[in-house]
Amino acid sequence: MQNYQKLIYIPLISLGLTACGGGGGGSSKPASSAPPISSSSTPSSEAPSSALSSAVPSSVAPSSATPSSAAPSSVTASSSSSAATTVITLNMASGWRGNGEGNAGVNVNSDGVSFTASGDNIGAVTDLAKPVQLEDAIVDMVVNVSPEFKTSGANLQIIAQIKGGAWAGEWNCWSGNEVLAASTDAAISCTISEADKKFNQTEFDVQIGVQAKGTPAGTVTIKSAKVTLKQPANSSSSTGSVYSANVTSLRELADFPIGAAVSNNDSPTYNILTNSKEQAVVEKHFDQMTAGNIMKMSYLQPTQGNFTFTNADAFVDYAKSKNIQVHGHALVWHSDYQVPGFMKNWTGTSADFITALQTHITTVVDHFEAKGNVNSWDVVNEAINDGNPVANFRTNDSTFYVKSGNSSLYIEKAFEAARAAAPAATLYYNDYNIDQNNAKTTKLVEMLTDFKARGVPIDGVGFQMHVFMDYPSIANISAAMKKVVDKGLKVKITELDVAVNNPYNGGWPGNKITSFTQSVALTQKQRYCEIIKAYMDTVPANQRGGITVWGTTDASTWLTTATSAYNGEAIAWPLLFDNNYNDKPSLRGFADGLQGINCTNL
Ligand code: XIL
């Protein structure tokens, strides 16, 4: 459609990036399970079937402990091979409880879920909601026991139990004390292999967890846990694969806006007004929407003086009806396809051009002020070039710069007009590649310093963050955000996507990743987590403008339709939901980052 990507990413090449691994980290599947302790050391009194059921308090009865979030909605998270498995990464931040009488409960902390191992059969469990097919599923956990636990000689037992009927369960998994080292992470595993196929549960939820066996002391921390389903899922997914990120609602995990870019009539297939799957995912997880296109200049004022608000109004009305805010995007952007012809062809004076620009801003912002629900704006988008080593304002490739008399004056005039029309709105300067802490960031900070000194009304900086698995580094992202924080301004991640393939590094296309395997998905999960965590760690609460992802599903990403770099191949897989609107592990990673949970590729 345009050469936008070239403008964005050429600096990445010139920086001489090394290959984007994507799947390089691998899934690092935990080692296979600890050998079961010998039968002679397993007293029959501790044996199987009644161990937990006898200790099930009413508090874990299904009715009070069935998080709908645990429902493994259909998702293809893993490889497209016929032997596709499905991985459910358990949420370590909530939904866990003590598993029986005498259990003091569990403690959710930054390391994971801990319990005090005060006796035999004391542990922690969480739920998997029906329908779930656990036959032959593998439960993998990373646990860490205290020195007291190690010294006590106690063992651990991964358990799974049906929350109804006879409360039957899987009790055959043992991780002996010998595989546990004090204060050291240990991978333990359990294959659910009860012969009677009772774990094909459509009737009841299942609880999964780990308990101490023997005469334990000290504490046990479950640092991460996942369930790999081996059976076709009870779902309508055509592949038979299922993945749930176990996230009830992303927006509920943050006290700042969590947004998504969505379409109206600019993309009939993914139209938020008509696509019920798009609606479901947006309404479940997001409390802010950005219009992917329809609030850009030529959509709102195609010819001078003729404003067309129909699509944008419907978009904002929908958001309003769902209690979702709208982030306005973008009042001024040079990108050719959306600059109205009358501006491109302007022959009047530069003063009149700036007046015309301000008229656009005033008219648009006034309109949405009257409508309500648009609380923030990208006032100017991408006004700085990617010069290396010295960046400057974009010049010849910006109609605004050229028609303003080869001047960047239009930037501050835009902010002034926006502020006058919307005194209470949060006004952002928005750009890409400023997360790299490079020459462009330096120019940005110079502009911010100047604007603050002269009282130009700016409230924050939008970091687009169209990034890759291995670029830019988290250190650079944090350092760049910190520079804006230090100016006392808000930081908003406005267009986040994490492309699995980086077509701008030297090794392309030799290193192209051609299938979205489980390993790649889990590496992406970790990357999402690290980015969100960097934001949380770097930006103080009162300066967080929010985080928006640029699209919902991998099928609708702009990266493979609006950019030339991928040559039309849908191999970016950059978002939180797969082509069928099912969760991806990246959704779990986003949630983990928000909650301060360790970022792992498990
Ligand atoms: C993109 C849209 O998603 C595409 O549909 C369109 O073809 C091109 O623009 N930075 C921005 C966004 O600020 O407005 C761009 O959106 C993506 C890059």
Image (cartoon, rainbow, N blue to C red):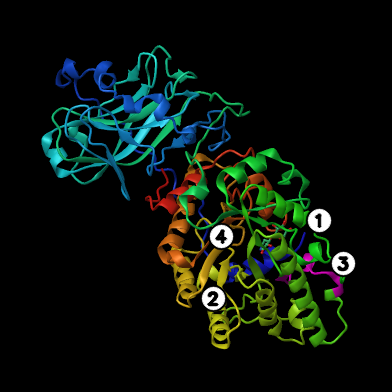
Residue 160 appears at what percent x and percent y? Answer: 35, 25
Residue annotated with mark 2: 441
In the image, what residue type sits under mark 3? Answer: Asn
Crowdedness of circle 4 by 10 Å Cα count: few (<14), some, many (20+)? many
Q: CA distance from mark 4 to mark 3?
A: 37 Å
Return the residue found at the far front. 370
Q: CA distance from mark 3 to mark 1?
A: 12 Å
Q: Is residue 10 left or right of residue 140?
A: right
Residue 467's disc is: 4
Quadrant of res 186: top left
Quadrant of res 32: top left
Q: Confirm or deny contact between disc 2 and disc 3 (CB under 8 A).
A: no
Q: Is residue 595 left or right of residue 237?
A: left
Look at the image and give the residue range highlighted in magenta: 332-342
Residue 310's disc is: 1
Ligand 1 in which quarter: bottom right
Tell me if residue 568 can be seen.
no
Residue annotated with mark 3: 306
- Sequence-first tag of 4 and 1: 1
In the image, what residue type sits under mark 2? Answer: Thr
257, 532: nearer the viewer: 257
